[in-house]
Each structure stands twice: as C-alpha cells, then as structure tokens.
Amino acid sequence: MKLVATSIRTKLILLVGLGALVPLGGVAAVAVRDVRDIRRDMVARSTLVASTVAEYSAADLAFDDRDAAEKTIGKLGRLEQVEGAALYDIKGRMFTIHRVPDLAEAAFPRTIAPTTGSAVDVKEDHIDVFHPVVFGDVRYGTLYLRTATTPLERRIRSFLWGIGLLALGVVGSSVAVVMALERLVSRRILHLASIARSIAEKEDYSVRAAASDADEIGVLGGSFNRMVEELARRQNDARRAIQVRDEFMSIASHELKTPLTALWLQVQGLERKAADMPENARKAVRAIVRHLQRLDHLIGNLLDVSRIASGRLTIERSEVDLATLVREVAARFDDEARRCGSAIDVDAAGPVVGDWDPFRLEQVVTNLVSNALKYGREKPIAIKVEGDAARGRLVVRDRGIGIAREDVERIFGRYERAVSGRHYAGLGLGLYITNQIVAAHRGVIRVESEPGAGSTFTVELPRRTTDPPVT
Amino acid sequence: MIGHSATRRRATVRAQRVLVGLAFAMAAPSPARAEELEYEVKAEFVERFTRFIEWPAASFGSPAATFVVCLAGQSPIAPHLEKLAKERAIKGRKATFRRVAQPKEVDGCHLVFIGPTEGGKLADYLAVTSGRPILTIGDSAGFAARGVLLNFYLQGGYVRFEVNAAETKKSGLQCSAKLLKLGKTVSLWGP
C-alpha cells in the first residue's frame, strides 16, 4: 500500500484528518437537519398562526365586523415575523388588511377565490399562507398571512456561524493534535535518525539518544544507545584485533626474515660449489635456490604489508629507466615462462625515465608479470612500456582466466584474490602491495578484464614528484 | 333625531355589501327601502347568531322537531323572519315562524325577537325566558341591560349588537366566544 511509503507526519495528518472527518460529518449532518427543521418549524408556526387567526375571524366575517376583524388580525402585529395579513370575504374580495409600514398593499393578493384551500408557499424572502375561514362547516372567507423569512434566515445564519466555528474548532484541534503528535513522535524519530547518521559519518560513538522507559520512542532510544555502545565496543575490538594482527605480522615477518638471511648465505656458498657436485646434487641446489627465492618473496611481501599497515612504506626516489627495468625483470622470468609455456613479448624500446624508487618499481613489475604467468593459462603475455612528457606507462596483458566484474574492485585489497587459493597458491598480497606502491608514487593502477579472455593491468606514474598525480 | 336617516343610509350601504343579492337597491334608496334593507340585515344576523350558539339537546323534543322562531309584538323584521324560517334550515332543522302576543305564549320558542312595541311587557317576557335556553333578541335601546340576551343597535352605519353576558350564561345556551367578542358586553359575567 502506498500509505506505508509516506512519512509518519503525513500518516498522522491523514489519520487525524480522517478522525476529524467523523465529527465534521456529524456536524454537517446536524447542520443540514437543523436548517431543514428550522425552515419546517417556521412554516409550521406560520400555518399555526394562520389557522388560529382564521378561526377567530370567522364571526368577524359572519357579522361583517370590520373593526373586530382589524382587531383580530391586528394582534398579529405583535409577532415579529409577520409582515402582513389580510382577510378576504366569501366573495374573494379583500375585507381587511394589516401590514407593516414598509410593505405595500400591492404585495397582497387583490382577491382570493373562496375555493382556495389551505396552502403554504415558501418564497425567497417570505412565506405565504392561505387558510380558509370556516366555522361550523360554513366558509366565511380566506385568511392570507405573509411571514418574513428574514428572522428565519438570521437564525439559520447565526446557527451556521456556530456550526462553522465548531468545525473550525475541530479542524484547529486536529492540527494541534498533529503538531503535538509530530513533536512527540515524528520529530524524536528524526532526531534519532540524525544521531545514527552522525555516528555513521563521523564515527563518533560518544553521542547518545534521549532514552526513557516512558514510551516506545524512549525505549527505542534506550535500545539505540545500547546498540551504539555495542557498536563502539566491537569497533574497538576490531581495531585492537587488527592492531594485534599487524603487530604479529610485523614480528613474525621479521623473525622469519632473520634465519632466511642466514640461510641465503649458506645456499650461496653451496651454489658456488655446485659446479663440482654430481648432477642430482646440483639439481637439488637449484631447487633449494628456487624455493628459497619464493620464500624470500613471500616473507618480503609480509614485511611490506606490515610496513604499509604501520605507515612505514618508504619510497626512495632516484632516476630510473622503466624500459630497462622491465626488460631485466622479464628476462628474469624467462625460465619460469618457459616452464609455464607462456611466451613473454616485451615492447619496451625507448627509455622511459622517471624519478621513481627502482626497488619498489621492480616489485610492481615482478608482481604484475608473475600474476600474468600465474593466471595466464599458458597463453602469450604482452608487456609494453611507453611514456609521454609527464608520465610513464606500463601495460601488462594476459589472455588468461580474467577477472569477474564483481571482483575487479576487490583485487587491490589486502588478502584478496579473485579465485580460490586452493587452485592458485599465494597470500593474496601482491596486487595490494602493488597498488600501495603505485599510490605512494602518486600514480594509478587500472585493470580491464573479461572473464575467460584475459586481463590488462595498466600502471601510470608521474615522472617527477612535481608532476600532478595521475587520476 | 336629525342624524337618524343619515345613520340609516350608511347602514343601508353597509347592508348592500353584506347582502350582495340585494345590490339592485344601490341607487339612492328611498327611506322605506332603506329600512327594509336594515331589517333584512338584522334578520340575516339573527340566522347567523344561531350558527354561533348551541341549544341544549333537551330544547328539542325529537330529532325531527322544528326550530321555532318567534316574534313578540310588532317589528319591520317580521316578513324577513318569516321568509328566513320558510327558506332556511336553522341548526340543521326545519324552521317555523310564530307570532307571539303574550309572554306566556313564548313557551316552545327557541328564539324570540322582542319587538319595540313590547317594552312595557318586557319584564313579563323575561320572567318566562330567563334561565331557559331561549335566545331573546331585542331591537331597542336598553333592552340588553334589562335582561334581553342580544340587542341590536346601529353604530357608524353598521348594525351592531350588545350581549348580556350574565343572562346568556344563565340561559344554558352555549354561546361561542367568537360571537361574544363581537358584541358589546352590557353586564359582567355573574357568579
């Protein structure tokens, strides 16, 4: 129903309005009935007066006593509404007349047929009553009575004024009720909503709503406050949990890094002596080196993430040629590419020099190329480096599994992967670190992807810190 | 009485209005004709009185009993009363006209018109009628004060009548208030 979609204020107005309609309808019905009754009453009174006067003028007409007749109908002068009265004899001619000074005699019928029955004729401003003058079954003439409806109209008007004032009172009190209800309900709910909004926007969990057990909104306020407290507590817990995790990560990655460094020294010593070893031992050393590189990479990522989390990711800028760097990294992936069956096509002819952190930039390229190999489904990979006056651009395109549209936003987040870790190894930190490094260079990273058709990652970096950041 | 004929004439004009059937007499009526018209009006009034007065049922011996109109003594109204009794029903009954010469003959009359000639014997007539449902009507000044129930007089050219309210009440006749208010009351209601 549409009513549900309207505001409480509108609902209140509608409900109170409907409520007011009932008494207003009643008042209107009473008014209509009373006005009708007042008119009917007036007609009845005129008829009664006419019949009484007619009764008493029978002898006057019978004995042709004009003086007495004048006296009889002259008594009508005491009645406020009577404008005039006249007696007509049995021949229909006017016998005697009584009228208020401002009513002309012409307003009276000149003759009234003696056959005229009792009749009432309600005109616009007066009522005409005709009544036969009869005594003992003998008709002596006709009485004509003219009654002004002005007092009637005045009565009706004052009555309608009263009714109007009453209706105004009903409407006024309805409006007052709506306003009071709005103050009591609607406004308080809106206040609650504004507090909720301010908590959501400013994360200020110290604000509280007015709470009481007095009514439902007070109870709602109480529940709302408990919810805010719980929210604050959970937020705090979550922050603490993240802090603990980040600390743990930082300690863990450092702790892992220390023996790894020692291990590297030992392995490098082994590598040097590898030429003198039998083939299977050499193979084992190569495997050790490969796995150690991988371990080094993973621990390095963990270290980077904990640096990023604690805001300790630093960029050390120097003059770097992105094209050379990309060629070197790609060359380093030759073995792996061959193993994966993906050819890497590098288009990095001209130097693209910028004021960048070479170590971090290498990480970016490494991450993108290793991702392309990982999700590339043994299809060729194209790497392109280009630049203009203000920025350098790196494009890495694969023809692999691609990324679902709903995952595109997510992949640059921490620990996020578009696909299950069960099929593709890794911690899900690569793109997060990449994105953070690019952002630290005031650059951007974009991805265009179609599931099943492959992904294209584009990194754009301003060449110098004075260049405007890439948007 | 200098003003008498003038008064008569005005009464005549008035009578013409009442008795439209006699309108042929409009043009300059002779004094004799005027008097005739006056008594025609009075006779008409006599009949109309009966419309506003109720006689007790005991006044009539049987449902078929006639309404007896009497004339005591002499009066120009005689032919008109006779005509009235002949032509009209009174109180829903056939009417008869009777002349009365002596008070004791009044017995059996429902209405007695006492002519001006009977002034001397009025007390005797009233001795018979007083307290009985017999409508006495006079046509002479002072008759009402002396005990006649209704008495004609002329005023401003109009035929008018006096009512002796006390005697009317005593008579047992039911006299409509509408009639009483028209008549000039000559005595207050008795105890």
Image (cartoon, rainbow, N blue to C red):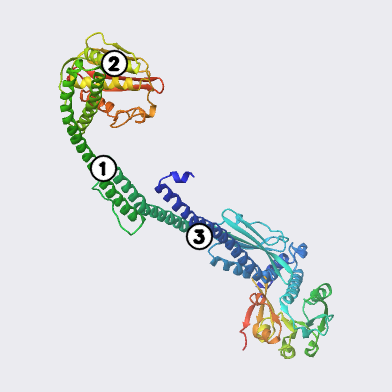
Nearest the viewer among A80 and A388 is A388
Q: Which residue is mark 2?
A: A335
Amino acid marked by disc 1? Ala
Nearest the viewer among A83 and A368 is A368
**Circle 1: is it few (<14), some (14-19), or many (20+) Cα within 10 Å?**
few
Letter of the chain that mark 1 sits on in the rendering: A
Element at label 1: helix
Element at label 3: helix
Mark earlier in primary sequence (1, 2): 1
Amino acid marked by disc 2? Asp
Q: Which residue is mark 3?
A: A155
The picture places residue B160, in percent across and down from the top left corner, at 67, 74
Tag count: 3
Element at label 2: helix
Of tags 3 and 1, the one toward the viewer is: 1
Residue B12 appears anywhere in the view: yes
Q: Is residue A276 left or right of residue A338?
A: left
